[in-house]
Amino acid sequence: MTITLHYFDVRGLGEYIRLLLIDQGIPFTDHRFEVFGEEWEKLKKTMAFGQVPCLTDGNEEYVQTGAIMRYLGRKYDLYGSNISEAAYIDMVFECVRDLRMKYARYIYYSEETKENYDNVTLPGILENLSKLLKTKFVVGDKISIADYVLFEELDVANTTAPGSLNKFENLKQLHANMSARPNIKKYLSTRSARINGVDRQ
Ligand SMILES: N[C@@H](CCC(=O)N[C@@H](CS)C(=O)NCC(=O)O)C(=O)O
């Protein structure tokens, strides 16, 4: 079965999925297209909710980032060992999604100033995430879908607000651990994609 990820040529929500597939050494086609370009306008009409990311696996087609990540998590054993671990993974996952939502509101709709985002919103959520991260990975020493989303958002924070992780030793350590994983390290060394669909970060 061939897996294809359809997403814009930016990191955005698609990057969580790319990181998981790359880290796990799962072959896939990384189908990228220009943000709001001609190809997208055609593709949009075929998408269940008119949005991406979209993952096809054989004849099946999945949309909604959380659904795709959980599908891959279940398929490749990256979703904890029991329902309690899965719930913890979901807690972190949803907290990270809240952070992305705040970032999106700030970057796309200017709902807050950069100063407020960097000094109040971002550190507030990082503090919550730091409290949730008690072990090497989100659940013990086994990687899960939550580690990929957390890593991506920490990396975004580290780029858009340099130094923002400094107060949170465990988040910094997770960022370092994830960056050092061989497949991720190789990918990061060549990645040039923008973080989002607009020109500022
Ligand atoms: N709830 C969806 C949101 C997906 C979403 O907002 N996709 C954006 C890109 S990140 C999109 O497709 N925008 C283009 C459009 O709406 O035309 C998810 O989590 O996947």
Image (cartoon, helix red, strand yellow):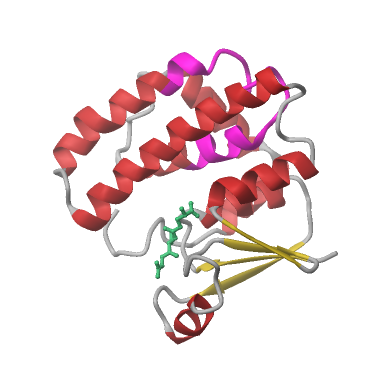
Of residues 31 and 179, the one drawn nearer to the viewer in this rendering: 31
Residue 183 seen in render: no
Residue 133 drawn at (x, y percent): 53, 18
**Is residue 195 shown left or right of residue 118?**
right
| Span colored in magenta | 129-152
Quarter occupied by residue 3 = bottom right
Residue displayed at 70% across by 32% down:
79
Q: Is residue 37 magenta?
A: no
On the picture, is 12 further left or further right than 58?
left
Rendered position, 130 above or below 197: above
| Residue occupying the point 42% across, 82% down | 37
Q: Residue furthest right?
A: 1
As drawn, 30 above or below 155: below
Q: Nearer the viewer, residue 73 or 120?
A: 73
Quarter of the displayed picture in which ligand 1 can be seen: bottom left
Percent of width and height locating residue 172: 48, 25
Q: Position of residue 103 (x, y in %)?
A: 31, 45
The stretch drawn in magenta includes residue 137: yes
Who is closer to the viewer here, 23 or 101?
A: 101
Horizontal side of 44 relative to 63 (left or right) equals: left
Question: Can you name the residue that lies furthest to the front here?
Answer: 48
Q: Which quarter of the figure is the N terminus placed in?
A: bottom right
Residue 158 lies in what quarter of the image?
A: top left
Report whether residue 116 is seen: yes
Q: Is residue 194 above or below residue 125?
A: below
Percent across and percent down for residue 160 are: 32, 44
Q: Residue at x 25, y 31 (%)?
A: 121
